[in-house]
Image (cartoon, grey):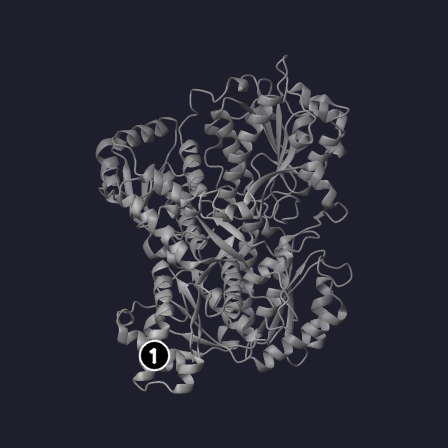
Amino acid sequence: MASPQQMRRGDLGRKYSVMATPGREGQQIQAGIYAGRAIGVFTSGGDSQGMNSAVRAVVRMGSYLGCKTYYIKEGYQGMVDGGDYIVEATWASSSGIMQLGGTVIGSARCKDFREIEGRLKAAQNLIERKILSLVVIGGDGSLTGANIFRQEWPTLLQKLFEAGRITNEQFQECGHLNIVGMVGSIDNDFCGTDMTIGTDTALHRIMESVDTISTTASSHQRAFVLEVMGRHCGYLALVGALATEADWVFIPEWPPEDGWEDTLCNKLSAERATGQRLNVILVAEGSIDRHGKPITANQIKDLLTDRLKYDTRVTVLGHVQRGGSPTAFDRILGARMGAESVLALMDATPDTPACVISLDGNEAVRVPLMQCVERTKNVQNAMNEGNFEEAVRLRGKSFQNNLATYRLLSKLQPPKKTADESSKGKRFAIMNIGAPACGMNAVVRSFVRLSLAQGYTVLGIHDSFDGLLYGRSTELINPASHHEDFAYVKPMSWTEVQGWSGRGGSLLGTRKVLASKYGIDKIAEKMKEYDISGLVIVGGFEAYHSALQLTEARKDHDAFCIPILVIPCTISNNVPGSDFSLGADTALNEITDICDRIKQSATGTKRRVFVVETMGGYCGYLATMSGLAGGADAAYVFEDKFSITDLRDDVFHLKNKILNAGVQRGLVLRNELANAHYTTDFIEQLFSEEGKGVFTCRKNVLGHMQQGGVPSVFDRNYGTKLAAKAVPWMAQQVKEYTQENGKVFTNTPTTASLLGMRKRHMEFSPLQELAKGTDFEHRLPEDQWWLKLRPLLRILAKHTETGYVSETIPEGVVDLEELDEY
C-alpha cells in the first residue's frame, strides 16, 4: 500500500482524493481555554434525524471550552432577520433534544440570503454579537452557501463599515469568518464522509416499513412497490433492498437494461412458482431507464397488474423517512461531529479553508469542503451524460460492492456456471458459537448463496459443536424431526435461506462453549468424516477462542489444516481484530430506546435518577456508546477504573444539575462486570442515600432483551458484506492449498484468520497474531478504539474534565471512492 507521502504526490490519482486532517479526539484540551470566543450554529435545508444531537454537542463542547454559543434559528433566514432569531444557547436549553427527530432550532429556505443586501444584514447581525465562527449543518447547497459567505466576508465588512452600519472597532476586530460544516442528509449523497447525519435512521424507517408490509403482503399474496426518497442518489433504495431482501430495486445511478419489464415479470413469476407468497420492489424517487425516462412506482404497479394479474399496491414512504427518533448511530455521529466542529473552529486561522467534519471509519476527520462538493457534483454530471458506470464508480467502492452483492444475492437460483473448477467436490461448513446476536442469520444467508454461486457445497452445522459431534446428515435423518434437543449437519440450499437477513437470534442454533470442552480429538474426527474443506465460525469471544484452539491443534490433526475463518458477532463488541462486531448496533438501539423511556419516566416523576445495568461482560462498549446516545450523566465500565470518590463526585454533579441547571432527571449506566464491589445495587443505594432531599433513585437491569429484536440495517448490511468478503477469501485459500490428491492442506498462520473492520477497511487478521494482544482472563482485546470517546460523554454531561483524550491518525489523503463504507 502506498505511503501518505506517495499519495500526496498523486501516485494514486489526486483527482478523486482529498487531504484529510486528523480530528482532535486524541488530544488534551483544557476546559475554558477559548473563553471570549463566540460560535453560531444553525441548520439549513432539509431536516434529518440526528441534527439535534449535533446541535447539543456544539453547545456543550463550546461551553466546555469557554465559548459563548448562539442558536441561529430558521437557518439562513434567521441569520438575515436577526433579533430573536439569534439567541444565546445554554446548557439547559440543549437538554432533552437529542432523542427528537428533525431540528429544534428550525430550518427554512431563504431567498433573501441570495441577494447582497440579505448577506449584508446577516453579516451585521453576526458582527453585533461577535460571532466569527459558524457551524452549518445541512446539505451540499447549504454548505456551499456558507463558504461563499465566508469568501465574501471582507467585502461585506468593508461595505458595512463604509455605510456606517458597523464601528471602526468592529471593522478591525471582525476581519475574518471561519465556517465548519456537518452534512445532515438522509440520502447519504455527499462525497467525503462514510455516512451523513440522518441516513441510518432513514434506513431504519424503510426497513421497518418493508418488514411491516411484508406480513400483510404474505397474507394476501400481494406485491408491494415502495417508493423511497433519493431524487439523485439511490443509496437508501439500494441498502434498503439489501437489508430487506427486496426482489428488485430501481436506482438512478444504475438504470435497468432495455426490456427490464420482461425480466422483472419473469423473475417474479418464477418466485411465485417456488411458493413465495409476496414480492417487494423498492424504487428510488429519481429512478430512470437507460434513456433518461422516469420509472415510477405506479408504472411498475400497472405492469404487474396488467401482465401478471398480481394484487399490487403502491406505498410512497415520503417524509416518514425523515421522521421519528434518531437511531443510536445517528445520535453518536451527531455528537462526535458536533464536538469536532467546535474544535476545528478553534483551530482555524484566517487562511484556513472551509472544512467539513467527516467520518472515516471510526475517526472524525476534517476534509476540505469544496473538494467534496466538486466530487458530489461530478456524480450528477455523469448521470446527466448517461455515463452510469462512471456515476457508480464515483459513488465509491462501497456503493459498487453493495450493487454487485445485491444483484447476485437477489437471483432466484445460483448461476449455472461455477467460478472455478477448484470448487468441485469442496465443502465449506458454517456454524455459530456463543450467545445469539442479530446479524448471525444475515451472514449465513449471504455466505450460503455466494458459496453456492461459486460451486461449493455449504454444510450448516446446527447447535455449534453439539451438532457437529452428535448430529447426522440429511440422508439419514428426516429434517422434519429436528427439535430443540436434536442437532444435525446438513447441506444448505439457495432457497432455504430466503428471508434470513431480517430474523433475529440464530436460526442455525448456537452454544456458548469452547471447543476444548468437547475434546479436540473428537472434533477433528467429525470434521474429517464430513470432509470439510473450509470452516467459518460466526460468533463472539467463544467463537474466536475456539477457532484459535483448533488452529493451535493443527500440528496434531490434519483435519484442522484447512482455511478457518471467524466472523465476529456479539453484542459485547469484545472480539479482537475488529472495531465492530455484528449485533452490537442492534443492541445499542435497544438500550437507547429503553433509556429514552426511562428518562421520560424520570421526567414525569421529577427529580429521579436511574441506574441502568447493561450487558457486555467485562467490555464497556455498550454502556459507553449507549451513554453517548442516551445522554447519560455517567457510564461505569471495567476498562476505566473508578473509585468511591468518583461515585461521590457524580452524586454532587447530579445534585447540582437538578438544583441549578433545571434538569429534573439523571441517567447513569453501569456495565455488568464494571466492578466486583461497586455493584448496581450498591450504586443505587449510595445514590439514594446521598441524594436524599434532592432526588430519588431507581435501578433497571436490562438483561437479555438487549440480544433480541429485529436486526438493524447496519447489522444486516454488515453481515452481508462480511460474507461477501469471506467467500472469495475461502475460495482463494482452497484453490491455493489443494493437494494433488484433491484434499486441502494448510498450516500457514494466515489461513486461520478473523475477518473484521478496522478503521474503515475489512481486514483478515491471523488468529495467532491476535492472541498476542488479547486479555483472555477478561475476554477483551488490549486495544479498544471506543475508549477515546469516554471523556466526550462526561463533557457533554457537563462534568468538570481536564482533557479530551483518544488516539490520533496521521494527516494524509482520504480516497473519496472508498469513503462511504456502511
> What kind of residue is marked 1?
Gln
Q: Residue sitting at 41 percent across and 38 percent down?
A: 403
657 vs 161, left or right, is right
Residue 128 appears in the rendering: yes
Name the residue: 30% across, 32% down. Answer: 264
Residue 498 relative to residue 305: left or right: right
Q: Answer yes or no: is residue 513 visible.
A: no
112 is higher (above) or lower (below) than 531? below
Residue 652 image point, x, y percent? 67, 77
Task: Out of 492 and 627, give the one closest to the viewer.
Answer: 627
Q: Which residue is mark 1?
A: 158
Question: Is 391 located above or below residue 517 in the figure?
Answer: below
Percent x, y of residue 104: 41, 70
For the N terminus, the quadrant is top right
Where residue 586 appears, as percent x and y from the top left, is 54, 50
Q: Please name whichever residue, 770 or 370, is drawn nearer the observer in this view of the structure.
A: 370
* Relative height, residue 163 to residue 72 (above, below): below
Which secondary structure, mark 1?
A: helix
Q: Is residue 650 left or right of residue 175?
A: right
The extreme top residue here reads 741
Q: Residues within 10 Å of mark 1 (few under 14, many from 20)?
A: some
